[in-house]
Each structure stands twice: as C-alpha cells, then as structure tokens.
Image (cartoon, rainbow, N blue to C red):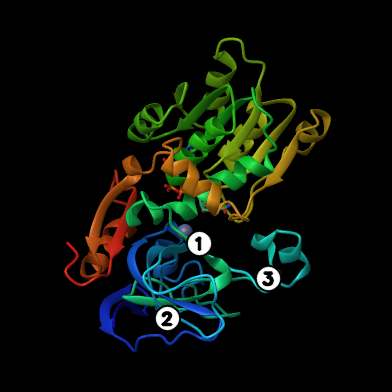
Amino acid sequence: MKALLLSEYKRLAVADMPEPVPGPGDVLVQVAACGICGSDVHGYDGSSGRRIPPVVMGHEAAGVVAGVGSDVRGFAKGDRVTFDSTVYCGVCDFCRRGEMNLCDNRQVVGVSCNEFRRAGAFAEYVTVPERIVYALPPGLKFAEAAMLEAVSVALHAVAVSEVSGGETALVIGAGMIGLLVLQAARAAGCSRVFVADIDATRLKLAKNLGADETVLASGEDLIREVSRLPGERGMDLVLEAVGRDETVNAAIDCVRKGGTVTLVGNIAPKVSLPLQKVVTRQIRLQGSCASAGEYPQAMELISNGKIKVEPLITAVAPLSDGPEWFARLYAREPNLMKIVLDPREGAK
Ligand SMILES: NC(=O)c1ccc[n+]([C@@H]2O[C@H](COP(=O)([O-])OP(=O)(O)OC[C@H]3O[C@@H](n4cnc5c(N)ncnc54)[C@H](O)[C@@H]3O)[C@@H](O)[C@H]2O)c1
Ligand SMILES: [Zn+2]
Ligand SMILES: [Zn+2]
C-alpha cells in the first residue's frame, strides 16, 4: 500500500509499505480522509519528540471497513467509520470511570515516542482496535469526519467547564481549536460568546461562526478591551486555546470572581501563575485534555449543523500532495486551517 512515511525529521515521502493485518480485536480501515493536525506539524521536525522516525503519522481519520479480526462483532466490511485518536485500554481504573483520555496505558494513533509506536492513517490502510471505532452517520462526509477529533476536543473543554446555560464566555485564540470551542460553547447554551485573537482573518471566521463580538488584542490590551464590553463584570467562563504566558494570564484577568478558566492551549511548557489573584478571587483553573467519549455528540452536532466544520477545511488533497502541504504548514503560511489528505487511488 501507499503511505506517507516520515523516514527522518523533515523528510516525508509517499512510500510502498506492507498492508497492515488486523489482530483478532482490530478493524482494518481503508482510509478516505485524514486531517493534518498541528501536533503532526510539531512532530515533523522532532521538536515534540512524539513522532520519532520512521513513522506514518495521521490520527484524524475516517474511511471504510476493509476487513475485521476474528473477535470483531460490531463492524463489517463496507461500513463507513471513524475512530478515536486515543487508543485506550478499556480496563484500567480511568477507562472504567469513562475517563479514557486519562488511560494509564494510553497510546495515540500515528504517534511514535519512547513509550510506544503506532502506525497512523496517512496511508491507504490502518488497523485500530474495535473499541475506538464509531459508525459514521449516513450524511456525514469523510472530510467532515476527519474534523471529529478536533470537535471532540472542543466539546470536552466545554464539558469539563460544567456549563449549565446562560453563561458569558470568552474564547482566547481563534485557531482550529478556538473556533470549535466557540461553537461548542454556543451549543452548550452560553448566552454570549466572545472571541479574542491577534489575527484579524481568524476573527472574521469567528464572527461568521457565531461569535457575538471579537477582540483583536492580547495581554493587557485584551484585558482592557474585555472590561469595556457593555454590562460585563468579567466573564463567567474563559476558555484559553492558545497556551502562552500572556494569554493564560489574560484569561485569569478576564474571568469574574468565582468563575472558571479552562486551559486547553499548551504551546508553552510553563507559564507564570498570579497565585493571589486566583486564590482571593476564587477562580477555578480547569485543564482539558483530548476527549472522553465526545465522538457521538460531535457527529450529531456536525450532522445537525450546530457545529460547522466546512469553513475550517482549507483543502482536501491526495496523499501525494502531503509532503508539500506539510512544508507549507511548517512554514506557517497564513490562512491555512485544516488540510485533509485522501489516500484513495484516483483522489484529486
Ligand atoms: N488540550 C488538548 O487536548 C488540545 C488538543 C489540541 C490542541 N491543543 C492546543 O490548543 C492550542 C490551539 O491549537 P490550534 O490547533 O487551534 O492552534 P492554531 O495555531 O490553529 O491557533 C492558535 C491561535 O492562537 C492565536 N494566538 C497566538 N498568539 C496569541 C496571543 N498572544 N494572543 C491571542 N491569540 C494568539 C493565533 O493567531 C491562532 O489563531 C495549542 O496550544 C494546541 O497545542 C490542545
Ligand atoms: Zn489531532
Ligand atoms: Zn485504560
């Protein structure tokens, strides 16, 4: 089969590789769409240490079942499916509590690090355990399904924020994750959702996707702008989707007393914490990692149009264009959002 192989850092090419054979509990998927994730781009040059070559990356995928292992009961050849990017064990204490994102034996599709290696979906075929596979609803396109992982991340961030409806929310960062968090906060019943970024084109998208107001500012300027929003005494909820010192600190300054700051962004390994502000204003800092069972909800919200993913897909391209798209993403070419690769023969 054809696969996009990272043979050494920054060296990506289509290669002929053996087709994977499903184990007894595995599903063999013929990949029809696989999104390039920011984490793939960060892995590509070795900076994250999570894509040690040789590796086939790709974990945001959908396709058609091409074969099943002897123990698989829930899927059959020809089914349209997607799968979780997290390969959880299903038996540890966390998995049993439904916190599969915290699984003690967690692996990720298309990741190779010191603890494990797993072939990913920038390939014609990939095998994954049956427990992480979901059937796709009939109307959902493969390229849209490649967005499910990111949508699930956004839904999880809102879920751990415990929104009950009517809250005001500020999303800091209007990248792929922030724009989905915006829509997830809306879908969860936040009464007003504001979005901040330093990139005006991203904020235009935020407006089109339902932001009540957008703020083109960061750091101190952002805090000042937010304090000027009519009728606001601080946000009930701030969702941080950048992950830098200044944006985390702005998040803490923009939330109301007793409010919640949910931390999704994680670009910087460390940030400073204004301890006394957090303690005396009794702010809840809540981390959010990946997703834990949000895939079905994500499929429903895309299908019923409450979450729009098409405006976030920049291009759908054949696997052979993968190296060029990686280079463009790596060079931080402006205005690129999600690139989806289609490994099927004859894909254009
Ligand atoms: N917790 C999780 O499970 C999870 C999952 C996926 C991604 N992430 C993290 O979420 C973050 C966002 O990911 P993404 O894919 O949306 O990235 P992205 O690059 O698409 O978006 C980042 C956005 O932040 C904006 N930005 C940068 N500096 C800023 C500043 N100082 N003030 C305001 N805005 C600023 C950029 O203009 C951009 O729009 C990253 O840190 C990523 O690692 C976390
Ligand atoms: Zn991803
Ligand atoms: Zn587990």
Say if disc 3 is inside 8 Å of ligand 3: yes
Residue 294 % position (x, y) = 58, 51
Q: Secondary structure at mark 2?
A: loop
Amino acid under disc 2: Pro
Amino acid under disc 1: Tyr
- For the point 80% across and 34% down, the residue is 276
Kindly identify which residue carries mark 2.
Answer: 53
In the rendered structure, the answer to whether residue 333 lies left or right of residue 242 reads left
Residue 116 % position (x, y) = 57, 80
Q: Is residue 300 above or below residue 324?
A: above
Kindly identify which residue carries mark 3.
Answer: 90
Tell me which label, 3 or 1, sits earlier in the chain.
3
Residue 338: tell me if it is visible: yes
- For the point 51% across and 26% down, the residue is 194
Contact, CB < 8 Å: mark 3 with mark 1?
no
Tell me which label, 3 or 2, sits earlier in the chain.
2
Contact, CB < 8 Å: mark 3 with mark 2?
no
Q: Which of the pair 252/157 is nearer the observer?
A: 157
**Mark 3 and mark 2: span between their CA atoms?**
28 Å
Kindly identify which residue carries mark 1.
Answer: 134
- For the point 35% across and 29% down, the residue is 204
Tell me which label, 1 or 2, sits earlier in the chain.
2
Residue 77 % position (x, y) = 39, 74
Quadrant of the rendering where the C terminus is positioned: bottom left
Residue 26 % position (x, y) = 51, 79
Amino acid under disc 3: Gly
In the rendered structure, the answer to whether residue 1 lies left or right of residue 222 reads left
